[in-house]
Image: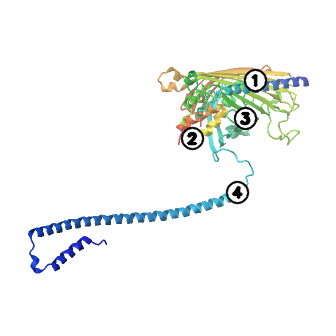
Amino acid sequence: MRCNTSRESSLRLGASLALLVAAIYAAGSAWGDGADAKPDAKPDPKSEPASPKKSEKKKLTGAELYAIHCNRCHPERYATEFTAAQWKTIMTHMRVRANLPAGQAKAILNFLQGDSGK
Amino acid sequence: MKPHLPLLGICALTCGLGLALPPGAAGVTDDEFNALKELVTKQGQRLDQLEKAHDQDQKTIEQDQKVHQQDQQEILRLEQQMETTQKTATDAQQKAEAAAQIQPIHPIPEGPAASHQFTMVGDAEVQFGKVDSQHSGFALADFAPIFLFRGRDNVLFEAGFDVTLQNGANVTGTHDSGSSTSVSMSFATLDYLFNDYVTFVGGEMLLPLGTYSERNAGWLNKIPLDPLARALVPGSGVGVQLRGAVPVNDSGASVTYAVYADNGPSSIDGSANSTNIDLGGNVGILNTGNHPGTLANLHGDPSGGGRVGWFYPWKAHYDIELGLSGQSGTWDDADRRLWSAGVFDGALHLSPWIEVKGEYLYTWESTSDVGTIQAHGWWLQGAYKLAGLNLDLPLINDIELVGRYDDIRDGMGGHADRYTAGYVYYLSNTLLFEGDYFFGSGNLEGPNHNELLFQLSYGF
């Protein structure tokens, strides 16, 4: 029985490592592509100009990301329902709970704060 | 006073002529008289010009005097201001010298200070139910606040509670009487956002085994009762977790991950008998048994688990999410028996009106009496908002139809199936009135009956 436990422990460790490696690989792949475009990031003047195909690609706005993410799990909450400070706290909570990418969470926050309640 | 020299000159000239000329010379020619008259006229005009110039000079002098007075006042004000500035500088220097004598003991955090903020969100529900062959009645009153405290931009403490009213505070004869209020903590975590890709979560965590535990607040559920198969896995656990998301491209797609360690399930009596597993696990200090005062988590190894998810939206309200998660760890005191779980979850949105989601759960419980129990179950839920019919009827447009199928097999011969049909009426975006009928069957106690349930829920 102890042998079985050791084998199961190895399986458990292997499964955990597989999950971790998969997550790190996916993160690394996307990171390597420079995918985390921050909403307020300024273009690097030294970088090469984007190809026509890339420049045609439209960057999602905070309003569009709000429409994509928020209604997946709950009826939409309107910007005027909370103050700008409350939205910052709530969006921190939602970024963690719903595992939202940081740049997208910031864009949604900017959108909500733009018309927040007083 | 400016002397009028031309006037005096004319007077002197006239007097001079009067004295110098003899009386006999008083007879002057017309030419001489006219020349003299012209001279006098010119002198008079000159006199007028001089008087005007004099008046202008007077005005200029008066204006200069006013400007001078204003300058004097400004100089006085500046002198007073300089005194005040010197006093402020002196005070600041004294304060700086005093502050320099205070040495910081702990590291000072970076970033703006005094950015904390407290917010309460959450939900509240009341239910009215009717179980087959039983009387109907109000079944639940629940207040579930979530307290959020943002210490800094990257630090959040969050705690969720369920405050519910329960019957049976006192037992009198054959009936319970009175009621009591129970307060249970759903989760309480400290979240530290290391960077854009990694967040640390520590405390009583909602476990990312599937997505249901993290997304099942009362007003989020389109069906009030949990899927049957969710009973196979714990909803929360005490431990630590690293989680985050990485955007895949500019379309909003992302890969998400969560890796955690927690106490995991434990044994009620320390043995590995099949009926003694406690999925929630022990927490804190042991109060009873053979080892009071020791850590209640009596098995040695923590459990480990995690989830990897992929979310892809092709436009707003059109998206798919898939996830694979699992957990494994020993549960008996001897650390010989493993409890493991694997969960596959998926969700699909095909417009603002259509949603389909579900989970498949499989667990392995190694025991000392009946070998390894393999329990499993699944659920699939669909919902359709009638607003998609474009009927221009407000009452109809605010209704969402919901249906679900539940299945559970406990691995020991027990099974149950349940069909659910219901609706959600959106009185507002946060006030929902739900009604569902549950058709249950199988040999497991609890879900094997039919039930009607109404729920009014409010998210705040």
Name the foreground residue: B130 vs B101. Answer: B101
Q: Is residue A40 above or below residue B322?
A: below
The residue to which callout 1 is attached is B342
- Marks 3 and 4, the one that precedes in the sequence: 4
Q: Does dot 4 land on a helix, a strand or a loop?
A: helix
| In contact (CB < 8 Å): disc 4 and disc 1 | no
Residue at the outermost right position: A2
The residue to which callout 2 is attached is A84
The residue to which callout 4 is attached is B100
Comparing marks 3 and 2, which lies closer to the viewer? 2
- The residue at the point 72 percent across, 36 percent down is B201
Name the foreground residue: B452 vs B162. Answer: B162
| In contact (CB < 8 Å): disc 1 and disc 2 | no
The residue to which callout 3 is attached is B205
Task: State the separation of the CA atoms marked 2 and 4.
Answer: 37 Å
> How packed is label 2: few (under 14 Cα within 10 Å), some, or many (20 or more)?
many
Quadrant placement of the N terminus of chain B: bottom left
> Which percent across, then down, holds residue B63?
36, 63
Q: Does dot 3 land on a helix, a strand or a loop?
A: strand
Comparing marks 1 and 2, which lies closer to the viewer? 2
Q: Give the letter of the chain under mark 1.
A: B
> Which percent across, then down, holds residue B138?
63, 33
